[in-house]
């Protein structure tokens, strides 16, 4: 195994006890723990409604549904994101229109390119806050208002990240979060949909559980005895076992993020000495989740970057690549368009280890190996 893995779970006895408590309560599906997780999440984000879900992919799907995105509608989205962001657009037979990113120093979607790609069929914009660094939300919300577009925030990378004093995920119409194992909050699988709009929340809640008007927990408590089905919904629920882990993880989040910020600073300092390796978002101020840490190294082809990754691998350092551009995948061939900045960045991207338990020694070791590899 790797000497320095990409990620490490921030789990302790608290998570174990929380799960045990849920198991012993004998209510393990959606119930009081899920409600507690939603309440805590909404409070920490300062948003009116939070709906816990099975994962973020279904959160993105529900976002499309409740915002009325349908067949033939165009949705502008980045290509430098996880494929789920774009798959969700296809679930409702809408058309993904890829927009480029800002540049080497800012890997979030470019508002100017968003504006260029608006047509009469455009219905929504999906943004993704890369590594937890906020997209240019003032500009994007201004464009959305002018053209009457909905805004969905894929905030998987950014729980508690801030933009102008507001938490990411709470600025657009709907925000989507993931609690997959390697995210800032880990529950194994899990997701959350947040919104300040009561109507959108109620609709998402209905669709989460088959379009049924009551939950089995309510029925078990005698609060209701029957139900109606008013729409073709899904089973997109979170269960109380995972939710109870989420409640504990949420309590640890702020401290975890403070440590990640420190790790990022070590990286930035160390890499200022490494010629030929650029650190996107360098010197940015503001509270950021630092879900991942990426550097740019290599050239136009991916050969040099891949050699650098091999060197790191040989030294016991795990790396990854966030992300292979989505517009290049075979399944999205018909939606292909030229994205020069995304391509230029993607051929040089390397994701390095990032988690709150990473030591300064490890960071210096990684920077040292990188420094030697860049000139190989
Ligand atoms: C992890 C992730 C997703 C998918 O989340 P799941 O909970 O695994 O469905 C979507 N978008 C981004 C940007 C992600 O990082």
Image: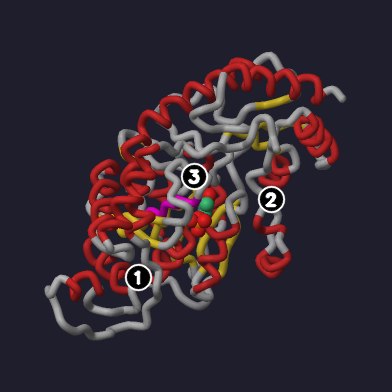
Q: Separation of disc 1 and disc 3 at Cα?
A: 22 Å
Query: Do the numbered discs 1 and 2 sit on residues whose CB atoms are within 8 Å?
Result: no
Q: In screen coordinates, is 96 left or right of 318?
A: left
Mark 1, residue position? 208
Residue 145 location (% of width, % of height): 36, 55
Between 169 and 98, the one lying in front of the other is 169
**Residue 178 painted magenta:** yes
Residue 50 location (% of width, % of height): 29, 55
Q: Label 3: how many residues lie within 10 Å, few (<14), some (14-19) or many (20+)?
A: many
Of labels 1 and 2, the one closer to you? 1
Above or below, 268 against 48 in this view is above
Mark 3, residue position? 183
Q: Is mark 3 within 8 Å of ligand 1?
A: yes
Mark 2, residue position? 324
Q: Would you say the magenta stretch is mainly helix, strand or loop? A: strand
- Residue furthest left in the image: 223
Q: Separation of disc 1 and disc 2 at Cα?
A: 31 Å
Q: In screen coordinates, is 15 left or right of 365?
A: left
Q: Earlier in the sequence, mark 1 or mark 2?
A: 1
Q: Label 1: how many residues lie within 10 Å, few (<14), some (14-19) or many (20+)?
A: many
């Amino acid at each position: 195994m790797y000497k320095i893995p990409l990620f490490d779970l921030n789990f302790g006895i608290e998570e174990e006890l929380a799960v045990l408590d849920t198991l012993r309560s004998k209510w393990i599906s959606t119930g009081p723990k899920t409600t507690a997780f939603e309440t805590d999440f909404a409070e920490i984000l300062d948003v009116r409604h939070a709906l816990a879900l099975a994962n973020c992919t279904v959160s993105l799907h529900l976002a499309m549904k409740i915002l009325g995105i349908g067949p033939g509608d165009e949705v502008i989205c980045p290509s430098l994101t996880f494929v789920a962001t774009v798959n969700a657009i296809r679930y409702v037979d809408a058309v993904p229109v890829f927009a480029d990113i800002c540049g080497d120093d800012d890997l979030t979607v470019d508002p100017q390119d968003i504006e260029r790609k608006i047509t009469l069929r455009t219905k929504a914009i999906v943004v993704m806050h890369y590594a937890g660094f906020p997209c240019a939300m003032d500009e994007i919300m201004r464009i959305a208002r002018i053209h009457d577009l909905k805004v969905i925030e894929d905030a998987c990378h950014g729980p508690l990240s801030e933009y102008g004093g507001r938490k990411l995920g709470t600025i657009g119409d709907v925000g989507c979060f993931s609690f997959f194992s390697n995210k800032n909050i880990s529950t194994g699988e899990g997701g959350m949909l947040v919104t300040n709009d009561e109507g959108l929340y109620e609709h998402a809640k209905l669709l989460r559980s088959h379009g049924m008007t009551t939950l089995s927990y309510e029925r078990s408590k005698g609060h209701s005895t029957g139900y109606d089905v008013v729409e073709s919904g899904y089973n997109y629920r979170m269960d109380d076992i995972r939710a109870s882990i989420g409640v504990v993880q949420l309590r640890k989040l702020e401290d975890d993020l403070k440590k990640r910020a420190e790790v990022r600073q070590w990286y930035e300092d160390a890499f200022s000495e490494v010629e030929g390796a650029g650190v996107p978002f360098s010197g940015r101020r503001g509270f950021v989740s630092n879900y991942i840490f990426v550097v740019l190294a290599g050239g136009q082809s991916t050969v040099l970057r891949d050699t650098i990754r091999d060197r790191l691998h040989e030294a016991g350092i795990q790396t990854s690549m966030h992300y292979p551009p989505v517009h290049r995948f075979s399944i999205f061939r018909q939606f292909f368009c030229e994205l020069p900045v995304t391509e230029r960045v993607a051929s040089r991207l390397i994701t390095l280890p990032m988690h709150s338990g990473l030591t300064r020694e490890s960071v210096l070791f990684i920077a040292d190996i990188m420094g030697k590899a860049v000139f190989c």
